[in-house]
Image (cartoon, rainbow, N blue to C red):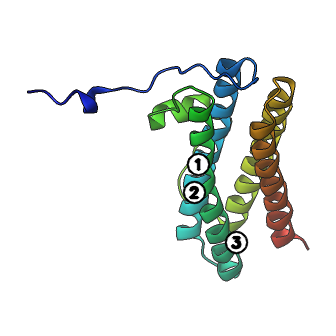
Amino acid sequence: MRNTVLEIKPGVEPLNTGVENTRKLATTVAACLADTYLLLVKTQAYHWNIVGPLFHSVHTITEEQYGNLFKAVDEIAERIRALGHPAPTSFSELIAISGIDESKGVATGEEMIADLVKGHECAARRFREAAEQADMNRDIVTADMLTARMAFHEKSVWMLKALMAN
């Protein structure tokens, strides 16, 4: 006797709540998820590898940020599912749709901070565009989530830049 319960795959499930163009919106939100995931990995790697006079400050701020990013990954992926579409399923898929580049080896503390600033700025722009799209598609819930994530990225830029101020 086969257990067919485990053979069920997620597919597109129509949403009947007034949200328009869920496929396009889910694709855009998936790109936000990809940016978040790559930024999470990068932030945690920099957390592990920071050395020098800014060790404690960078170590502390990156721990706070990767904790936030980790929680966000689940929230964003679940929103894609709530829109009726499957979330990305592989790291290669996430890399392909992300606007954030992978880290290239060991970096200095200054390079790490500059790279994180660049990543958070990229994510903030992407989340802003996605929030505007969600709003145009009458999806207040997704727009609200994306706006909150955008605020996190903008605050992260400010905090990281403050570390490097003269």
Residue at left offset 44%, top offset 34%? 90
* Between discs 2 and 3, the one toward the N terminus: 3
Q: Quadrant of the C terminus?
A: bottom right
Residue at left offset 56%, top offset 49%? 74
Could you say where residue 151 lies in the image, as x and y percent from the top left?
Answer: 83, 53
Q: Secondary structure at mark 3?
A: helix
Q: Nearer the viewer, residue 8 or 1?
A: 1
Cα–Cα gap, marks 1 and 2: 5 Å
Q: Which residue is mark 3?
A: 61
Could you say where residue 75 lies in the image, as x and y percent from the top left?
Answer: 61, 48
Question: As shown in the figure, which amino acid type bears the numbered disc 1?
Answer: Val
Label 1 close to label 2 by CB (< 8 Å): yes
Instruction: Please tell me whether residue 53 is drawn above or below residue 115 in the rendered image.
Output: below
Q: Is residue 42 left or right of residue 134?
A: left
Question: As shown in the figure, which amino acid type bears the numbered disc 2?
Answer: Phe
Could you say where residue 23 lies in the image, as x and y percent from the top left?
Answer: 64, 19
Q: Secondary structure at mark 2?
A: helix
Q: Residue furthest front?
A: 16
Residue at left offset 27%, top offset 27%? 7
**Mark 1 nearby-residue class (10 Å; few <14, some 14–19, many ≥20):** some
**Mark 2 nearby-residue class (10 Å; few <14, some 14–19, many ≥20):** some
Q: Residue furthest right?
A: 166
**Mark 3 nearby-residue class (10 Å; few <14, some 14–19, many ≥20):** some
Q: Secondary structure at mark 1?
A: helix
Q: Indicate which disc residue 73 carries.
A: 1
Q: Indicate which disc residue 70 carries.
A: 2
